[in-house]
């Protein structure tokens, strides 16, 4: 049973206007999975004054529960200055409320020892670490967010902005611009167009000052040795994951045969250090490929079940809107693949039904999408080369380094789904984009 938000009367600390805000003391993502993303994005217990627009997170005790991870975390803000015995009593009551809402067979041992988060930031970290995200990744992301906030504060101060860019030029890389683009999209989708516009302004100013390096993709004529060297030089973290994804097609049997031969040659020559490093590289590649394959399989399973549900819906558009937060690139990719398979089998009725679902999904998604994402969707549906060329001509104003970064991010995700038809289509379109950008620069 879900634990509903409690309407709470508060006074705006800025203009003293009283208003009602929704407050949650229990976040049970087993009952309401969508709360997890909302909470991590700072949308839970966020109050905004209807009079002056001032907003912020409400300071309230919390219990976070994720039964699939057997994760139970308590958080009592230090600002409440609550005595220890009172904290213990409050947390105990909330834990009991969660446990009592479960059937007896689901009340497991982890309820007896809930974890404690001393800060909201440490609570976020515990949730993300349970998802397999390392502390190193979290610290790296936090450093990028801190830099983003510093740059944002200086967006209208040219002197300070120039100084910050020079001090942090090496950190203004491809991943930083992906984070910036994601932030723009998130604020736009949340209806905060003012912040989205300021972030867009910052992105434009940064791109005037730096040129972020794109993920390293092996050249068509690259040998296996070239590819091995490229991966040896790739940094851990986001760079590594993207490099494996965008070069996945080249990581075939021949590649691993070549890598194994280099390991054996180094061992035979007595170079144990090189042999060990290459062996570790091979294992890292295999581990990352397995991890990406599992993510894709899980995502495809969920997407397949969703497509089945949509195909049975009486009101298709209403069903799509009800599940819009579950729809992603893989859902769209599977719909297109299933439609192509139905046509290949001359099952026109099924192909038409899948086509209707696909069109409805895209129409609903595009209502609130940023221009870059809408353009990618149009390119997916257009026929190469004439159709895609016409689409790109009609949207020349969007063709810049930022759009190409967004396009490459989408392509990298799609490559993991192994949808060779769509991947080949977008690779051809990418060449058109680069060619048109070159003309624009000239």
Image (cartoon, rainbow, N blue to C red):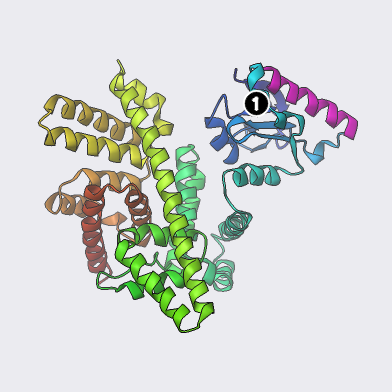
For residue 285, which quarter of the picture?
bottom left
Expressed as whole percent of the image width and height from the top left, the position of residue 49 reads 63, 32
Q: Nearer the viewer, residue 253 or 41?
A: 253
Residue lying at 25% horizontally and 66% vertically, measured from the top left: 440
Q: Is residue 331 visible?
A: yes
Q: Is residue 4 left or right of residue 365?
A: right
Report the residue marked by disc 1: 21
Assess whether residue 85 is covered by the magenta stretch: yes
Residue lying at 45% horizontally and 72% vertically, measured from the top left: 232
| Figure check: 354 above or below 274 | above
Expressed as whole percent of the image width and height from the top left, the position of residue 350 reads 18, 26
Assess whether residue 128 is covered by the magenta stretch: no
Q: Is residue 17 left or right of residue 149?
A: right
Residue lying at 49% horizontally and 37% vertically, measured from the top left: 190
Residue lying at 36% horizontally and 22% vertically, measured from the top left: 319
Q: Nearer the viewer, residue 342 or 271?
A: 271
Q: Main secondary structure of the magenta part?
A: helix
Q: Nearer the viewer, residue 8 or 114?
A: 114
Residue sitting farthest toward the left: 346
Expressed as whole percent of the image width and height from the top left, the position of residue 11 reads 72, 29
| Figure check: 265 above or below 139 | below
């Amino acid at each position: 049973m879900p634990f509903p938000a409690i309407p709470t009367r508060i006074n705006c600390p800025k203009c003293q206007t009283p208003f009602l805000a929704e407050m949650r003391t229990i976040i049970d993502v087993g009952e309401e999975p969508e709360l997890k993303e909302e909470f991590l994005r700072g949308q839970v217990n966020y109050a905004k004054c209807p009079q002056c627009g001032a907003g912020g997170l409400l300071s309230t005790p919390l219990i976070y529960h994720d039964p699939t991870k057997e994760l139970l975390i308590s958080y009592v803000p230090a600002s409440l200055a609550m005595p220890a015995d009172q904290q213990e009593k409050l947390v105990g009551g909330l834990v009991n409320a969660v446990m009592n809402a479960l059937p007896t067979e689901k009340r497991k041992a982890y309820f007896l020892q809930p974890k404690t988060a001393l800060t909201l930031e440490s609570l976020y970290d515990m949730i993300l670490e349970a998802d397999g995200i390392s502390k190193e990744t979290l610290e790296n992301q936090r450093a990028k967010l801190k830099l983003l906030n510093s740059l944002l504060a200086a967006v209208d101060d040219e002197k300070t902005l120039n100084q910050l860019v020079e001090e942090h030029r090496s950190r203004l890389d491809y991943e930083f611009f992906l984070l910036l683009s994601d932030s723009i999209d998130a604020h736009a989708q949340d209806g905060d167009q003012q912040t989205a516009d300021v972030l867009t302004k910052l992105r434009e100013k940064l791109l005037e000052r730096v040129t972020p390096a794109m993920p390293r993709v092996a050249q068509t004529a690259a040998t296996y040795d070239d590819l091995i060297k490229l991966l040896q030089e790739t940094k851990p973290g986001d760079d590594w994951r993207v490099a494996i994804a965008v070069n996945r097609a080249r990581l075939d049997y021949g590649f691993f045969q070549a890598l194994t031969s280099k390991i054996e040659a180094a061992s035979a020559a007595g170079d144990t250090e090189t042999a060990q490093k290459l062996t570790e590289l091979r294992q890292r590649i295999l581990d990352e490929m397995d991890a990406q394959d599992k993510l894709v399989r899980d995502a495809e399973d969920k997407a397949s079940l969703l497509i089945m549900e949509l195909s049975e819906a009486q009101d298709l558009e209403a069903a799509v809107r009800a599940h819009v937060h579950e729809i992603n690139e893989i859902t769209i990719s599977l719909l297109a693949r299933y439609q192509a398979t139905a046509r290949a089998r001359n099952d026109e009725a099924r192909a038409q039904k899948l086509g209707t679902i696909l069109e409805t999904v895209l129409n609903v998604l595009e209502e609130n999408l940023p221009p870059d994402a809408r353009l990618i969707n149009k390119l997916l549906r257009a026929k190469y080369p004439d159709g895609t060329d016409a689409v790109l001509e009609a949207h020349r104003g969007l063709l810049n380094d930022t759009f190409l970064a967004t396009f490459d991010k989408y392509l990298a995700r799609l490559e993991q789904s192994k949808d060779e038809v769509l991947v080949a289509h977008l690779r051809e379109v990418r060449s058109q984009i680069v060619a048109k950008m070159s003309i624009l620069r000239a």
